[in-house]
Image (tube, rainbow, N blue to C red):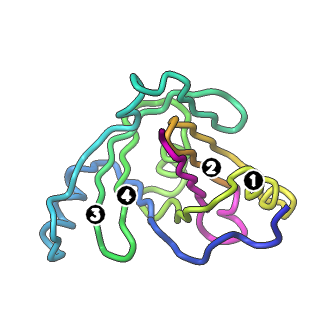
Amino acid sequence: MIDKIGTNYIMKVGIVVENAEEAASYYQKLFALDEEICIDHQHPKKDIYPDSYQQYNGVKVNAEMKWFIVDLNPVYLQIVEPCDDAPSPWLSYLKEHGPGVCFISFCVEGLQDHIEFMESNGMPMTFLEEKGYERYAYFATQEKLGVTLEFKERKTIR
């Protein structure tokens, strides 16, 4: 078992909004970005990885979101818009707090060790997503830290 989070490097800040296209257009106007802001949807590789799944508060879900990436090197922003009424951390955040910073993300090795570490510190996992090529976990840290922590683990694809 680990005794600290495996990194101090924030890789991503997740911002939940009601209209991702509108928010992305403002970021494009305000910042000198090297690339166009790109858009994607939640499961772009679901056909390739049929074992992909999401679990929110212990229940399997299939929440869709629209998202844009804004590269503000060394950190990037992920502008997230929930696309349906399926339970998700993004929809819950938007309903409870309105638009804002929903999560900060860290890329870690040993996601299961990090899950156990967070749970042993009274911050249980609330969301898990398996995409086949990477995994994400969110934790109940909003009350203690003022933001949700997301850990991301990338897998080696052969």
Residue 121, position as x, y percentages in the image: 84, 64
Identify the disc placed on residue 78. Answer: 4
Q: Are marks 3 and 4 in contact (CB under 8 Å)?
A: yes
Residue occupying image coordinates x 54% and y 47%: 155
- Position of residue 148 measured from the top left corner of the image (x, y, whole percent): 60, 61
3 or 4: tag closer to the N-terminus: 3
The type of residue carrying mark 1 is Ile
Crowd band around label 2 with a 10 angstrom C-alpha radius: few (<14), some (14–19), many (20+): many
| Quadrant (top left/top right/bottom left/bottom right) for the N terminus | bottom right
The alpha-carbon separation of the residues under discs 1 and 2 comes to: 8 Å
Residue labelled with disc 1: 115
Against 53, residue 116 (above or below) is below
Mark 2 — residue?
Answer: 137
Mark closest to the chain's N terminus, 1 or 2: 1
- Which of discs 4 and 1 lies nearer the camera? The answer is 1
Type of the residue with mark 3? Val
Mark drawn on residue 58: none
Q: Is residue 137 left or right of residue 75?
A: right
What type is the residue that disc 4 sits on? Gln
SS of the residue at dot 2? strand
Q: Quarter of the image holding residue 145?
A: bottom right
Q: Which residue is mark 3?
A: 70
Residue at 76 percent across and 73 percent down: it is: 4
**Pointer 4 local density, CA inside 10 Å: few below 14, some 14–19, many at least 20:** many
Sequence-first tag of 2 and 3: 3
Magenta segment includes 47:
no
Viewer-closest of 2 and 71: 2
Q: Earlier in the sequence, mark 3 or mark 1?
A: 3
